Image (spheres, grey):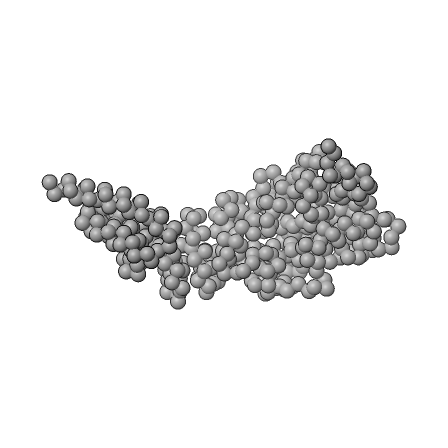
């Protein structure tokens, strides 16, 4: 049985963008709409548009600046090279595509940006028609060095795999290799999952960067694939001016967001007064090996007026860090505070301390029994009860055996 795609082709319906060509006779081709240039490559012509943002020109809250400290970003990205490379080696990457067509998806616009002397240089590579794809990929490749680091927004999951696939489909070597890569989407989700309702780039622009896009200049992301398909059918590139502007803004926002994130991570107590953001930064510190910095952040955050659940999680995280560095006195103080407020986990931690560290089985048993009582009172969620009941029963049995042996 033939596939749906085969039947549609038999009826003359075009699938994908590979064989579509714009109507070259139109008076509104891309060359007349945007101030770009045609570059010759080994594979034919490629259309390129360039922008330059002077260092003193504001974008959002202020001029674009490369972060002074990327140590925490490098630790989060698990690549020390990120903290060592100079500003000009960072390549900010964003693509516009024909949609979600699997292996048939094309990146018809690739935008890259770099910090250069005097400002920020951006270059956009445009696929005037699908037959020029190899030429576009070739010139993109020539603008990426194996000494670069990538900065993207969901580029690890989308942009880079897509481009790798297009290079492979065209029998070409992709330029990404093992380049360091900072994906700001994942970092944004980590820091602002509780603080912001959305971590989409456009929403982060408004919430954090002081950037508001003008509707008459910008194309919403969901509309971009259709605008390109319309262009391929009609040859009229005028609506694509908004797509180029959209990509241009995305790349600038990557640079602004990297600075914003890096500054938050480098000096959170100076850059933030939001408890949920500070807790997220503290947890990131703890997960990436900056335990002492995490303790400082957590202790400062505990001085804020916190919701009850936030305070509980913060106390638990801080006590865990104290325990890891062997400061059981500080950890015990936090556990006792939480136990007085009726938290089961704190009773368990105290019981573990008295059993394994202090060797006081009586107190260990006492705190275990108190935890069991809390579970039996029904004040805990059913999931917590299911989790704690077998663990506490096992601990109670073990402690009773130890006490029985000690009294013989």
Image coordinates of residue 225 in percent, x first then y, are: 72, 51
Image coordinates of residue 402 in percent, x first then y, are: 18, 42
**Left or right of residue 95, residue 32 in this image:** right
Residue at 62 percent across and 45 percent down: it is 158
Residue 47 or 352: which is nearer the viewer? Answer: 352
The quadrant of the image that shows the N terminus is top right
**Left or right of residue 277, residue 64 in this image:** right
Image coordinates of residue 107 in percent, x first then y, are: 70, 45
Image coordinates of residue 166 in percent, x first then y, are: 69, 39
Q: Is residue 50 visible?
A: no
Residue 234 or 63: which is nearer the viewer? Answer: 234
**Left or right of residue 305, residue 15 in this image:** right
Q: Residue furthest top?
A: 1
Residue at 73 percent across and 36 percent down: it is 3
Q: Height in image: 283 above or below 80?
A: below
Residue 245 or 397: which is nearer the viewer? Answer: 397
């Amino acid at each position: 049985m033939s596939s749906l795609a085969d039947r549609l082709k038999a009826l003359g319906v075009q699938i994908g963008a590979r064989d579509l060509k714009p109507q070259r006779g139109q008076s509104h081709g891309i060359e007349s709409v945007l101030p770009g240039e045609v570059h010759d490559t080994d594979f034919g012509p490629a259309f390129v548009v360039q922008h330059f943002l002077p260092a003193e020109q504001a974008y959002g809250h202020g001029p674009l600046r490369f972060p002074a400290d990327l140590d925490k970003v490098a630790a989060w990205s698990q690549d020390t090279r990120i903290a060592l490379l100079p500003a000009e080696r960072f390549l900010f990457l964003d693509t516009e595509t024909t949609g979600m067509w699997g292996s048939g998806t094309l990146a018809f616009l690739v935008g890259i940006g770099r910090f250069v002397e005097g400002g920020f240089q951006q270059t956009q590579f445009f696929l005037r028609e699908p037959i020029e794809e190899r030429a576009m990929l070739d010139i993109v490749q020539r603008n990426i060095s194996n000494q670069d680091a990538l900065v993207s927004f969901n580029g690890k999951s989308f942009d880079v795999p897509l481009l790798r696939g297009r290079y492979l489909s065209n029998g070409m070597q992709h330029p990404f290799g093992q380049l360091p890569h900072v994906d700001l989407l994942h970092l944004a989700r980590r820091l602002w999952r509780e603080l912001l309702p959305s971590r989409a780039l456009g929403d982060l622009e408004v919430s954090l960067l002081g950037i508001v896009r003008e509707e008459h200049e910008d194309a919403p992301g969901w509309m971009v694939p259709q605008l390109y398909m319309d262009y391929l059918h009609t040859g009229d590139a005028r609506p694509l001016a908004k797509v180029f502007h959209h990509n241009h803004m995305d790349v600038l926002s990557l640079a602004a967001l990297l600075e914003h994130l890096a500054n938050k991570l480098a000096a959170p107590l100076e850059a933030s007064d939001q408890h949920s953001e500070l807790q997220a930064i503290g947890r990131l510190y703890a997960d990436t090996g900056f335990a002492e910095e995490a303790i400082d952040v957590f202790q400062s955050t505990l001085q804020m007026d916190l919701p009850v659940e936030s305070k509980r999680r913060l106390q638990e995280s801080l006590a865990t860090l104290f325990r890891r560095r062997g400061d059981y006195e500080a950890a015990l103080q936090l556990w006792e505070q939480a136990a007085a407020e009726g938290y089961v986990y704190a009773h368990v931690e105290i019981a573990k301390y008295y059993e394994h560290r202090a060797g006081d089985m009586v107190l260990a048993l006492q705190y275990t029994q108190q935890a069991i009582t809390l579970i039996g009172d029904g004040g805990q969620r059913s999931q917590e009860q299911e989790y704690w009941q077998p663990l506490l029963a096992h601990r109670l049995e073990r402690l009773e055996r130890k006490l029985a042996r000690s009294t013989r």
